Amino acid sequence: MRSSIFNNLDSQQLPPGFALENHKMLRVQLPHEVLAKQGSMVAFQGQMDFDYEGSGGLGKLFKKAMTGEGASLMRVRGEGQLYLADNADDIHLFFLENEGLTVNGRNLLAFQPQLSWDIKRVQGAGVAAGGLFNTTVTGTGWVAVTTHGTPVLLDAARMPTFADGQSAVCWSTGLEVGINRTMKVGALIGRGSGEAMQLAFRGQGFVLVQASEGAPVPAPSA
């Protein structure tokens, strides 16, 4: 796997398609198709058609409805330069080489259509845990993810690694992932989870963690 976050992304040695216009804007070179988060287009030059892709089929639509995971997608076809962004979040590129990446659905900005994707439950997390589903992308091609601010890259092979489920942006699919629950009642971890638990990662691979848990949770109405 090659990535801008690993500093091993030499665009001259990889197939054309994705490039960073700057750290908050993605430039996609068509005539190849691309799947992108709906509403992420900020500009384009050339001739392009934008079609609603939804969640990628009935099965994925059902999973999205049941889990809340996965972004609504659009399919873009045509020729020219397409520019994508999402709330001025930082953008990071990954080039998968017959491998996989697990991504928090709200952080998935765009990917090439030859890649396969599905919504999967985090190992060890029952439905009652809530919100512990993520999008897995596999194959060979470009993937763009977003982060709130500058993230930290953690090597799970060095030692057991833990992260809040809302702060973990993406990780290697080869990692063993489970749930770590603290026994301390007052140690509530994560605004989104509302529980004293974290994702636990072990094995050979990385975890990308953003400097935020996401959008603030709205206060309940009176």
Image (spheres, grey):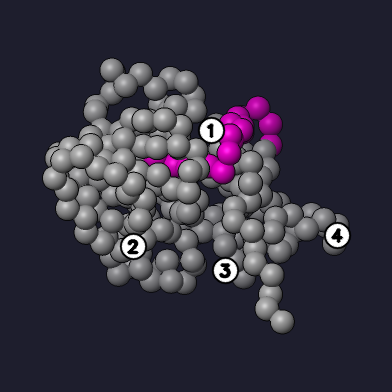
Counting residues from the start of the chain, the first of labels 4 and 3 encountered is 3
| Mark 2 vs mark 1: in front | 2
Whether tag 4 and tag 1 are in contact, CB under 8 A, the answer is no
Image location (x, y in percent) of residue 163: 66, 45
Q: Name the residue under label 2.
A: 55
Identified by mark 2, the residue type is: Ser
Q: Residues within 10 Å of mark 4 (few under 14, many from 20)?
A: few
Counting residues from the start of the chain, the first of labels 2 and 1 encountered is 2
Please tell me whether mark 1 sits on a helix, a strand or a loop: loop
Q: Which mark is residue 155?
A: none
Whether tag 4 and tag 3 are in contact, CB under 8 A, the answer is no
Counting residues from the start of the chain, the first of labels 2 and 3 encountered is 2
As measured in the structure, the alpha-carbon distance from the residue carrying label 2 to the one carrying label 1 is 28 Å
Q: Name the residue under label 1.
A: 205
In the rendered view, does 192 fall on the left or right side of 11? right
Whether tag 2 and tag 4 are in contact, CB under 8 A, the answer is no
User: Is residue 173 rendered magenta in the image?
Assistant: no
Give the residue furthest to the bottom.
222
Counting residues from the start of the chain, the first of labels 1 and 3 encountered is 3
Q: Which of 37 and 55 is in front in this view?
A: 37
| Mark 4 vs mark 3: in front | 4
| Mark 4 vs mark 1: in front | 4
